[in-house]
Image (cartoon, rainbow, N blue to C red):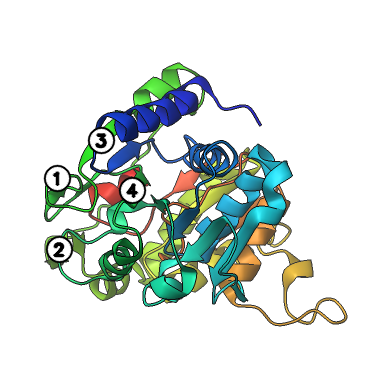
Amino acid sequence: MQLRPYQQDAVDAVYAHLRARDDNPCVVIPTGGGKTPVMASMCRDAVGRWNGRVLILAHVKELLEQALDKLQQVAPEMWHQIGVYSAGLKSRDTEHPIIVAGIQSVYRRACDLDRFDLVIVDEAHMIPPDGDGMYRTFLEEARKINPNLRVIGLTATPFRMTTGPICGPDNVLNSVCYEIGVRELIVQGYLCQLVSKGGREDVDTGGLRVRGGEFVADEVEALMDKDERVESACKEIVEYTRDRNSCLVFTSGVQHARHVADLLRRSEPGRDGLRRDLRPGSRPGHRRVPRRAREVPGQRQRPDARLRRAERGLRGDAAPDHVAGALLPDGRAGLPALRQ
């Protein structure tokens, strides 16, 4: 797998930073721009060229699966050197040169995993600015094992609505070593041109409270998940996407997602967005898996599909190449969520 020019520039910028400075760099690439191949390339170099040991951290298993997939594409010869430590993926490898891990599974297990030279954090804006969060807890213990540990962050949103930039002298990540914007990738042909359309119904969000830079989730769902509002939104969705092969529909919560999915099924009975062959009991021996684990693979495997997802697992998860539309009847407030 050959990196795109800007991806190679990002890798080179990280290496230059690590050579010239003693602190921790951050790479900013827009959602859809391909951060995971950058991570995979750095892992290949660190282990194959410099005999180091690397840990990739992320907060949802979909990101771990993406990292594993790209590592296999970038460095297939190193597949036997890659381990996984994640309860969600039912694996607890500890001795491989490259470990891909869920932070929830390892944040109290730094000693079990032993020494690392590099820790790469996907969706690095999830690292808290202060306090004793899982990332900080793990890194503090990991530095006791290797005081020279370096941390590399990758994100599409290098800021928080409440506290500002994620990089700073006293933060885990200290400076942005490489950044490319959405507009640049559109001009270069790597991202599609965005065309926005406002919904026909105006929604008054003036009564919603804000917490952590986002509207309070339960209040948003109560506001958006009203019969007439959902019916109006679904009618527009069907109209806008009749000539599309696929689309993403963002909702404000699980119940809202189910409501939207039910109406879309009834509006287009011949185009059921959930793959029937991925539902429990549809094949002999098919085991039950969570709804999120069924719907997402179904959308990825079938071009003519509609994916309805709630908030969990959405940010940072790579959408398939054939997605032709994204609709947001969810009322979210935060700029980071919109950029994701």
Callout 4: SS: strand
Q: Is residue 282 left or right of residue 130?
A: right
Q: Residues within 10 Å of mark 1 (few under 14, many from 20)?
A: some
Which mark's residue is nearer the viewer, 3 or 4?
Answer: 4
Residue 123 rendering spot, x and y as whole percentages: 37, 52
Q: Amino acid at mark 2?
A: Asp
- SS for tag 2? loop
Label of residue 130 in the image: 2
Mark 3 vs mark 4, CA separation in Å: 14 Å
Residue projecting furthest to the right: 284
The residue most toward the top is: 187
Residue lying at 85% horizontally and 76% vertically, measured from the top left: 283
Q: Which one is nearer the viewer's eye here, 104 or 271? A: 104
Q: Earlier in the sequence, mark 4 or mark 1?
A: 4
Label 2 or label 1, whichever comes before in sequence order: 2
Q: CA distance from mark 4 to mark 1?
A: 15 Å
The nearer-to-camera label among 4 and 1 is 4
Asked if the residues shown at circle 3 and circle 4 are in contact, with their CB atoms under 8 angstroms apart, the answer is no
Q: Which residue is mark 3?
A: 176
Residue receiving disc 4: 150
User: Which comes sooner in the sequence, label 2 or label 3?
Assistant: 2
Q: Label 1's element?
A: loop
Say whether residue 27 is left or right of residue 89. left
Inter-mark Cα distance, 2 to 1 = 11 Å
Q: CA distance from mark 1 to mark 3?
A: 9 Å
Residue occupying the point 80% across, 79% down: 286
Q: Quadrant of residue 22?
A: top left
Q: Tell me the kind of residue under disc 4.
A: Arg
CB within 8 Å, label 2 to label 1: no
At 35% from the left and 42% from the top, the residue drawn is 156
Q: Which mark is residue 168?
A: 1
